[in-house]
Image: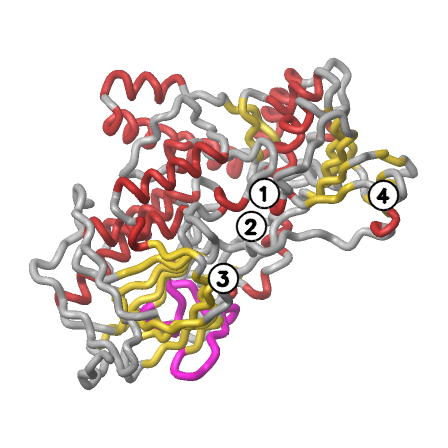
Amino acid sequence: MGVSTIRPVRPVRPVRGVPVPAEPTPAPPAPEGGVEHLDVLIVGAGVSGIGAARYLAAELPHKRFAVLEARADCGGTWDLFRYPGVRSDSDLYTFGYAFKPWRHRESLADGGQILAYLRETVEEHGLRERVRCHRRVVGASWSSAEARWTVEVEHTDTGGRSTLTCGWLFGATGYYRYDRGHTPEFAGRERYTGTVVHPQHWPADLDHTGRRVLVIGSGATAVTLVPALADRAAHVTMLQRTPTYVMPVPRRDAAAELLRRLFGEERGHALARRKNIARQRLIWSFCRRYPGAARRLIRRVNSRLLPAGYPVDEHFAPPYDPWEQRLCAVPDGDLFRALREGRASVATDRVRSFTERGVLLESGREVEADLVVTATGLELQLFGGVRLLVDGEPVDVAGAVAFKGVMLSGVPNFAYAIGYTNASWTLKVDLLGAHLCRLLAHMDRHGQRICRPEVADPAMPVRPLLDFAAGYVRRAVDVLPRQGDRGPWRGSAGYREDVRLLAVDRVTDPELHFSPGAVPVPARVG
């Protein structure tokens, strides 16, 4: 990859509290061999990467940065998932960006609308030239002597390799593997004569019309698939080991639409976003503080939407409290409507084995199916599987402690984006993007090139970063970073607390160490 000149993006309205240096900080010279050097390299062009790129372009337009994306186009999750009915389970006033109003009538949007929204963001903010597709980062090595990362890049379209360097590395790859989902080992699967598919890799030519479909799973993907498939399938059965809390949510937000009509797109969007943030917080807090009352309320709502005499407690009463795992939202109660109309059914049981015609359950019942969908979850993978080294030593991610939920202890000039599990993902992305700009501006003002979090108390108690009971988190708990029992190492308590931590409080901290770093000897490109 040769040296390229990237035109600065015209800044948009700045975020309050994010200073922009009056004069650009000169970039370090490129080393011998013409290896390109960037101030910031963003890995991943999904919701997090696009959001971070917009904040950099708007607040620090002098910074040289690029976004590397392994896939053929930007969009991340919303470019990957193509299964029937794919949609958000968070409202788009909070799942969308703070700086780009959501203009569609649907508050719970389908995947195509979200993908179009993300690509509009790229075009509107001049980010297309920053995004380099077919580029997978496979390794990154930090040198304290040079105050830079050396990044190994695989070209997924040609199989070639290239190298570049950067002052900061930002991981915006989410927390799951794109190349495969989680599928348990099912006995007898080789005997099954029908079709088996995982939602993460749904074939474009798969036609389920008139077929008997079995969906194994009960999470957000399963409750999305069942009503979407039931529209054309002969019948859809959702097989779950354990029930999930499911609540109907209006597909359209009448209050948000009213706010947009009264106050215009931008102001209306901001007010609707604030309203929905408060509502999310209220619901989550109520469920955690009064789990018994929340359980009874959810059961009452479910009972009203299901046929008379339906075994609600068997199929919709989980053994855990509400919001110990994420609560599933179904737009306009579409899952319950499919159950009422007999187009779908639920079986709460376990798979004993596959048969030639379907699946044999532990109860002895056989569910015959022409198509089996294994909606059995994600496989966690942090930072896109990138191998990180610091001064020649591999980074033990599971042994590192998260600093403000943004950086890792002992890893310089590295930030990452992991959104909320109890609210919309993008709420955290907006805070992280603005915070990173504040941090970089602070370093520019003070002539610092290295920023490294270090835990002052080695005896500080730690626990997993994602303190969440979902199966995909429990399966990967041993590879996740840790969190401490005090700030700034304690995990996020929610959006409101993060606003103070990331947007209001100072970017400096006694356990965040800055240094000017070694100035490399100027080298001629060529």
Q: Which residue is mark 3?
A: 156
Q: Are marks 1 and 2 in contact (CB under 8 Å)?
A: yes
Would residue 512 be found to the left or right of residue 27 on screen?
A: right
User: Is residue 269 visible to us here?
Assistant: yes
Looking at marks 3 and 4 on the same chain, the residue that comes earlier in the sequence is marked by 3
User: Is residue 487 visible to us here?
Assistant: no
Q: Residue at x 23, y 52 (%)?
A: 57
Looking at marks 4 and 1 on the same chain, the residue that comes earlier in the sequence is marked by 4
| Helix, strand or loop for disc 3 | loop
Where residue 310 appears, as percent x and y from the top left, is 76, 20
Q: Quadrant of the N terminus?
A: bottom left
Where residue 245 appears, as percent x and y from the top left, is 62, 33
Q: Which residue is mark 2?
A: 468
Tell me if residue 359 comes above or below residue 270 in the rendering. below
Q: Which residue is mark 1?
A: 325
- Depth check, mark 4 against mark 1: the one in front is 4
Identify the mark at residue 13; answer none if there is no mark.
none
Looking at marks 2 and 4 on the same chain, the residue that comes earlier in the sequence is marked by 4
Query: Disc 4 residue type?
Result: Thr
Q: CA distance from mark 2 to mark 3?
A: 34 Å
Taking the view exactly as shown, the residue that stands out farthest to the top is 308
Q: Which residue is mark 4?
A: 193
Q: Quadrant of residue 520?
A: bottom left
Q: Quadrant of residue 355?
A: top right
- Number of labels in the image equals 4
From the viewer's side, name the closer residue of 454 and 415: 415
Query: Disc 1 residue type?
Result: Gln
Looking at marks 1 and 2 on the same chain, the residue that comes earlier in the sequence is marked by 1
